[in-house]
Image (cartoon, rainbow, N blue to C red):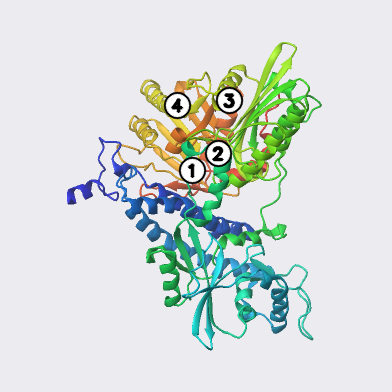
Amino acid sequence: MSKKRKTEDLGTTKLPSRNLGHRAYFLNRELSWLEFNRRVLEEALDPKNRLLERVKFLAIFGSNLDEFFMIRVSGLRRQFSAGVLTAPPDGMSPGEQLTAIRSRLIPMLQQSTECWHQDLRPKLATEGIQILSYDDLRSNQKKSLRHYFRGEILPALTPLAFDPGHPFPHISNLSINLAVVVHDPDHGERFARVKVPHMFNRLVRLPGKRIDEGEIEFEPQTTHFVWLEEVVIANLDLLFPGLGIVTAHPFRVTRDADVEIEEDEASDLLAAMVELVGQRHFGSAVRLEVDAGMPEEIREILQSNLGVQSYQVYALEPPLARSDLMEISKIDRPELKAPVFLPITPPVLTRDESIFSVLRRQDILFYHPYDSFNPVVEFISSAARDPDVLAIKQTLYRVGPNSPIVQALREARENGKQVSALLELKARFDETNNIGWARALERAGVHVVYGLLGLKVHAKMCLIVRREKGGIRCYTHLGTGNYNPVTARLYSDLGLLTSDPTIAEDVSDLFNSLTGYSKKNDYCRLLVAPGRMRKEIIRRIDREIECHTTSGDGHIAIKINSITDRQCIKALYRASRAGVRVDLQPRGICCLRPGVEGVSENIRVTSIVGRFLEHPRILYFRNGGKEELFLGSADLMPRNLDGRVEVLFPILDRALLKQIRNDVLFFHLKDNVKARRLQRDGTYRRVQPRKDEPVIDSQALRLRDRGSWHREEGS
């Protein structure tokens, strides 16, 4: 036993070098994700960021944790309860992972609490944005809020008693609730639950007018708020007339939202998804957040009736649900936010020329959000109006509300085009949006495919079929991000418009396999999952090893969301052992352990968390000078390579390849402001610029120089 521990000691002892699948070479997926969220929290802590941007990052930290518990922790809980023995590559059992998650998370929660109370809240107050405690309000402010409570909030409240005649009420997922103890003169103390209504803003704005005789009015920019639950607590006597309010404390329940649909038993996938979305409110409780001041006896009532153990309870200083701090970040104070910028349109598209005639001459590359998403929308909209366009085929994963893409597809159908939309109903937490769009498209006469049995369609592609003088020509858009104009301003993504016939043929074949029946898995240009994508990626890694053996300049660079696939990681270890230089930049999870002597000392892993969510997937292979570069939708994860329809597409234009390589991939790898470097123990350290190198904040510099991004035609 002691000998085994020595071989796995990451501090000083050399790790086993022969078996690249040894668990010591893999970082735990869930703990790696927590390290990603720690980097989000660090952005909230960073005084170099503007104040409301810091508040936004703190809100994102909270919302990320909500989803983590709903999906990842709930999955571990189910495995633990079922006695699952199969361990991930790092070897940790479900119970060990749950213990490690809590141990890692508690200090982070404390740090986030201190960030809010000791740093952000006081700084907001100095800027005239005050988040006040109800007890600190003046009497006239309380009087005004009581009037507001009586007229607006009280009618929406429903107290639910808990006693022998009233069962414990259902607590809906992520709702803010109050555990209230009242004193009944006839029956003593009683327990009740009050749900804080979600249709009101969580932060109640106080009136900005004269309060008392002789007191000044609030300054025009002054914004005062109080938490909604504090308003409710202060006025509970109106909800429980004739009873004494003993105490009231907020609490919040997170439920298992990873409800899986039995697709092979569903005769109607749309109806089944509608039912599934409703089930999310009734999943088992996986986390109970309580006010740190809640008495133990009340906490025990909640625990026993919700069926949670002590380790699932998180006692926090208020406010709970800090994701709602996003309301503050939306206050109209431009000087406290990141500077506003206007995305540009590639110059070649600003001329009085059809986008189709431009594409017959050249490919067009977009780098969002620095480039506007409008040309992508116009590409589809112009096809909808063009009398020569015969058909439009489109995948849709997360399109958001009021989607201009969906509107264009409906217009195309009204104009007599053949329109097929593969709309993924199983896009987690976007199911409701997508269900609505599926129905709207079907009403317009669009042929809608909901997805595939057992798979999610995650590929981002659009195919336009057009009749021209020389015959039928196809135009294709392929991207790394969703067809969503809102997230296209928040996420960094790459997209390609091309009329290359071989790519169009591949995309057409893939659409046919998605809407019909096909066992095709070998494409001319595209790497497609499930099927050959993993095999082709590993083949290219092994090819790089061969090239390095010959020329000594092997280089693999990958920018991606997450790296967890065991086979791909082992292949990268082989490349490192052969001397190939490997640069990885996953934004989130990375299960590869860098810096291990004899295994991964040639692998450098960095991660960027900044103003924009880094979302491109770029795979670069030097290939002995015959460089290959792929973009696409797939991460190096089993779920992407085995359980989703994904596409990686090559950049065939050598000038565009060089542009992506130098101005995106290699440029981000040089970031020494927002980048953190993964250490051997799984933690990250912020990259610091050396004295002899320039300071590079890749996102900020790209914003500054976005006008120089596009090469002129023929250059």
**At 60% from the left edge and 49% from the top edge, which residue is drawn?**
611
Quick check: can you spot residue 388?
yes
- The residue tagged 2 is 269
- The residue tagged 4 is 531
Does label 1 or label 2 sit earlier along the sequence?
Answer: 1
**At 58% from the left edge and 42% from the top edge, which residue is drawn?**
271
- The residue tagged 1 is 261
**Mark 1 near mark 2, Cβ–Cβ under 8 Å?**
yes
Position of the C terminus by quadrant: top right
Q: Residues within 10 Å of mark 1 (few under 14, many from 20)?
A: some
Residue 260 appears at what percent x and percent y? 47, 45
Element type at mark 4: loop
**At 74% from the left edge and 25% from the top edge, which residue is drawn?**
355
The amino acid type of the residue labelled 1 equals Ile
State left or right for residue 601 relative to residue 306: left
Q: CA distance from mark 2 to mark 4?
A: 24 Å
Residue closer to the observer: 104 or 288:
288
The amino acid type of the residue labelled 4 equals Gly
Residue 227 to residue 182: above or below:
above
Residue 372 appears at what percent x and percent y? 70, 38
Q: Mark number for residue 252?
A: none
